[in-house]
Amino acid sequence: MPEFVPSLPSRLYRWIVLIFVSLAMFGNYYFYDALSPLADVLERQLHFSDENIGLLNSFYSIAPIATVLIGGFIIDRIGTRKALLLFGVICLIGAIITAATPLFWVMATGRLVFGMGAESLIVAVTTAIAKWFRGKELSFAFGINLTIARMGTWLAQNSPTWAKSAYSNWQTPWIIGVAFVTLCVIGPILYWVLEVRAEKHYKLGQAGHADKIVARDLFKFGTSYWYLVALCAIFYSAIFPFETFAVKFFIEARHTSREFGGFVLSILTFFTMFGTPVFGLLTDRVGKRALFMTAGALLLIPAFLTMAYTKISLYLPMSMMGLAFSLVPAIIWPSVAYIVEEKTLGTAYGLMTMVQNIGMASFNWILGWANDRSGAGPGNPAGYHLMLQILTALGLAAMVFGFLLRRRETGPHGHGLETITTQSSAALA
């Protein structure tokens, strides 16, 4: 009698695979977010302006624009495991360049190279998870992956506490970041070993399709989709560029220590680590997606205004931002699947990602320019008001597009964002 060979890997095997690919995301997120606690050191020791600091993250955000344009071609061409390792190595090269010299343009080039590897790595990780969990616990697997990745963000934001002495020199925090980016290589190597072994013993699923833009699909999207794209781009343009300058702002305008500033910023990340899956489950049960996204955008307005014009504890505005950043991303990406045809999902997600990163690249630079123009610094805390006014305006604009989306979706041209729930889907089935 022939020996029985399982057709699929065990659940434990799949979760081990998930942990290893998530390690790559952990290192990726750590290095991206290592800039914020370091910003004032770069200003003091290397004489970087806020515009320079903003451009460091702008260069990172430029990379996904090209990534989306080439789509999943490389992944499709060379396979998931080779792509993971390739992009992980590019991340490491970019991180090393960033940490190598005090020259701004070398550092910016390093951020650009890192961004090219990091964003492509995220696409490859998404493809790998889809390959291993399609038809299984896919949504939960993505949630766990994101939680592990955001632990990297949380650790970076709190690095002034656990690596306090490193901030006496501009280069040491970058070097610590490079050490974490080695996980972007180690994780794919371990994944490679597990996948090769699994191919000999199990029947694996097919990889998921990477997001890419197909020009002819652009004409198939309706008004609700474009409202969603606008909301996404504006909302993310408020959150991530603020994070770039947050610790520097806390130190210079609210007179916190670097350690406390990093901790307060990490409140936002802490909320998202646990709030995002909760809000995702909530909206699956009750619907009202556009309404919840509008409420999330609304929370940004008092958060930025209270930081600008009151001395209220930073715990309150950062908690409001944490709620907003848990709420909107939990809903906005799944919502695309309700309002575009399945065959155009790759184009829809690719275009939304590209527009989002154009916004983030622009506003990282705009906020840095605004701080320099206003003379923001420890001698002029009010100079940060212009930055916070711009962010407040973004929150207002995001809320307006959320309102327009809700009005559209509650009218005759709606796609079910406000009404579809897991119960209603089950009833239809």
Image (tube, rainbow, N blue to C red):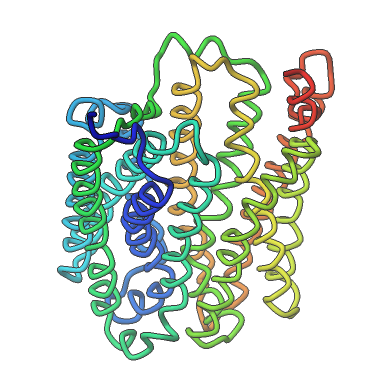
49 or 10, nearer to the observer: 10
57 or 204, nearer to the observer: 204
Residue positioned 43% across, 53% down in the render: 365
Residue positioned 43% across, 74% down in the render: 37
418 sits left or right of 89 in the view: right
| In the image, residue 302 above or below residue 397 | below
142 or 338, nearer to the observer: 142
Q: In which quarter of the image is the C terminus?
A: top right
| In the image, residue 12 above or below residue 429 | below
Residue positioned 68% across, 54% down in the render: 324
273 sits left or right of 191 in the view: right
Residue 384's spot in the image, x, y percent?
58, 69
* Residue at the outermost front position: 1
Q: Please indicate, yes or no, whether residue 56 appears anywhere in the rendered image.
A: no
Residue 395's spot in the image, x, y percent?
68, 49
Number of marks present in the image shown: 0
Q: In which quarter of the image is the N terminus?
A: top left
Residue 233's spot in the image, x, y percent?
55, 39
